[in-house]
Image: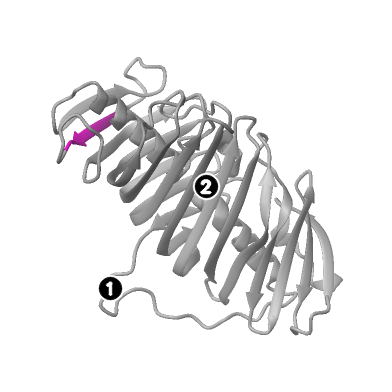
Amino acid sequence: SAVCCGGLVMAAGCSSGGGGGVAPVAQAAITSNNAGRIGKDAYDAQAGLNNAGDVAGSAGGILSTTEPTIAARSLAGLALDAIRLGAARVSAGKSPNQQTVINCGDGSGNDGTFTLTLTDTPVLNVLDAGDRITATFTNCVDNLLNTTSNGSMSITIGTISGDPENDAAPWSVSVTLTFTNLTITSPEGTVTSNGSITFASSWDPATQTLSVSMTGSNVTMASGSETLRLTGSFSFTLTADAAGDFSINYTMTVVVDGVGSVAVSTPAALTGNADGVIDGGQIRISGDNSTLTLDFTGDGNVTVTLDSDGDGNPDCIQNLTVNTLDQFDDAAC
């Protein structure tokens, strides 16, 4: 399945306002020499926001749910699971600022803990706008996903309609997610998150479809000496059905450290199924008078087309896979 940038560390954050934030970065000229790195980073940008391979019917995560969900390794999955846990605590009539400590892993207490703190305002025992759910992880092991989580995230409800705990009826929720040194470690690497993004999710029981969207500004991803940054505003939308079939659309500006910025979009939605491999759709990457197009043709295969001079004609076409995008061969062009 798609992995989170092979050990990518992710930190989600917002501009400080008042003239703060990230300074503009010059647009990169996409060439045969840097196409592999740019293509991989543009693909990995969406994987960093959500690991598509974690989308499947009854995927689990912290809660066992009946509709498609996103497992604990992804930020969206953590948010959705915490919202559902919060809804369950509210409907059970728990008092404001109630803390619940849950054993992770096999439940023996040896696999760390997950602490949920619910600030229930303004209407008691009702999950409504203004309520805040804080989830704190202490060496929390998920044996199914082979992940360990530490740190915390808080979720402030913006709008809510219906009951996220009831899959028999439609529901929708929008929240602000704030991450404080939230780290999720898996065999693929460690994801560390700080800052805030806006998250929205809705469930349609008639079509058994879960929709997730995330928007924000200024996201930094780093792995060792490499840094990948998304600047300005970005948007990410994922839809999944009960069979695990999914589609992803996103637009963002990606800054590749030492190379420059590129605009990334999906003219055709990325699609896949429960195995998590993207097998359809297109990513278009636009640089300084140059473009790179990734066409997903099935079974993880990708046709990579470089137009290095912006004349609309391909200068180099190579057939790669989602795992070998960084191996675009300069010498073959």
| Residue count near mark 1 (Cα–Cα under 10 Å), binned few <14, some 14–19, many ≥20 | few
Graded by Cα atoms within 10 Å as few (under 14), some (14 to 19) or many (20 or more), the crowding at tag 2 reads many
**Which residue shows up at 83% across the image and 79% down it?**
313
- Which color scheme is applied? one colour
Mark 1 or mark 2: name the one nearer the start of the chain.
1
Horizontal side of 9 relative to 51 (left or right) equals left
Question: Which quarter of the picture shows residue 171?
Answer: top left
Residue 72 appears left or right of 109: right
Q: Is residue 224 visible?
A: no
Q: Is residue 99 above or below residue 46?
A: above
Q: Is residue 331 left or right of residue 106?
A: right
Residue at image point 53% right, 70% down: 253
Callout 1 amino acid? Gly
Span colored in magenta: 114-120
Q: Quadrant of residue 64?
A: top left
Q: Which residue is under mark 1?
A: 17
Query: Which element type, helix, strand or loop, lies under badge 1?
Result: loop
Quadrant position of residue 206: top right
Q: Which residue is mark 2?
A: 50
For the stretch drawn in magenta, what is the main secondary structure? strand
Mark 2: amino acid: Asn
Picture mark count:
2
Residue 188: tell me if it is visible: yes
In depth, the one of 75 and 108 nearer the eye is 75
- Marks 1 and 2, how far apart at CA: 26 Å
